[in-house]
Amino acid sequence: MINALVIDDERYAREELMDLLEESGKVNVIGECSNAIEALKKINTLKPDAIFLDIQMPQITGIELLSMLDPDTMPKVVFVTAYDDYALQAFEDNAFDYLLKPVEPARLEKTLKRLTRECQPVDYAPLVSDMLELIPCTGHNRIILLRPAEIETAYSDLSGVHVVSKTSKATTQLTLKTLEEKTPLIRCHRQYLIHPQAIREIKLLENGLAEITTQSHHQVPVSRRYLKELKDRFGLN
């Protein structure tokens, strides 16, 4: 049985696909999402085997959502789209699977057979962007979309991953690894990232440690492991 999430901003399209999946007897629908931000959290929490992902969604598209997932733990992805066959040729050439709206049961059956036998991870690199343009975050009863340039530092603790801008602090479902690889933020500590342009001062401490003060006066630790890289970056050695 395949554990799957259905992600689509259209309620009726989402419910229709969920019904078809349940009727197939091959899929256990463990959740549904109406937007990419909600989907990101559920993917990280529920860890589905596969996601059925609408491409065209408001604010953050299905393709942009892929850019935010960790390639090492990414589920298999089936695109659900209203694009025509010509536009989908690119997906076929790169071995990506898709369903064309409205979803036909016979075509869905082929997809499910493929999912069942597919063992190798799929490389989504040809589709996703190298860098993220927006960082989805949650604050107090609100959703925040931050540009990487706004973020001074990011860090992880037991409650999750947090990003700090000049004016706010918010939580994101993105991992520090994803932020490090797909934004200008650089590693300065096992649990901290820093935006190079946000550095106001680097204070050298004892035992090879250091502390960064950002432009907004946030304090960020620097470990011995990353201090040399930081010095080299700014020509301080």
Image (cartoon, rainbow, N blue to C red):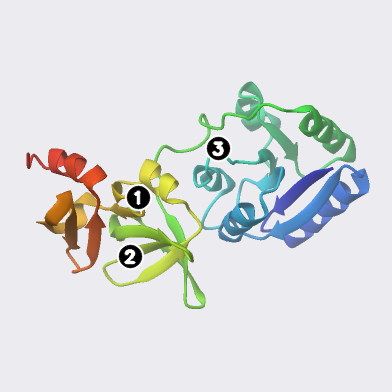
User: Which is nearer the eye, 108 or 184?
Assistant: 184
Expressed as whole percent of the image width and height from the top left, the position of residue 95 reads: 65, 25
Image disc number at residue 164: 2
Is 50 above or below relative to 153? above
Dot 2 or dot 3: first in sequence order is 3
The residue type indicated by label 2 comes to Val
Left or right: 75, with 15 as reference point: left
The residue type indicated by label 1 comes to Arg
Residue at position x 20%, y 40% from top? 229
Q: Which residue is mark 1?
A: 190
Q: Name the element at disc 2.
A: strand
Q: Which residue is mark 3?
A: 72
Q: Name the element at disc 1.
A: loop
Left or right: 147, with 214 as reference point: right
Residue at position x 81%, y 58% from top? 15
Q: In which quadrant of the rendered image does the N terminus lie?
A: top right
Q: Residues within 10 Å of mark 1 (few under 14, many from 20)?
A: some
Q: Is residue 102 visible?
A: no
User: Which is nearer the eye, 112 or 187?
Assistant: 187
User: Which is nearer the eye, 7 or 74?
Assistant: 74
Q: In which quadrant of the rendered image does the C terminus lie?
A: top left
Q: Name the element at disc 3.
A: loop
Left or right: 153, with 158 as reference point: left
Which of pointers 1 and 2 indicates the residue nearer the eye? Answer: 1
Q: Residues within 10 Å of mark 3 (few under 14, many from 20)?
A: few
Cα distance between the residues tagged 1 and 3: 19 Å
Residue at position x 53%, y 34% from top? 127
Residue that protrudes farthest toward the front in the picture: 207
Dot 1 or dot 3: first in sequence order is 3
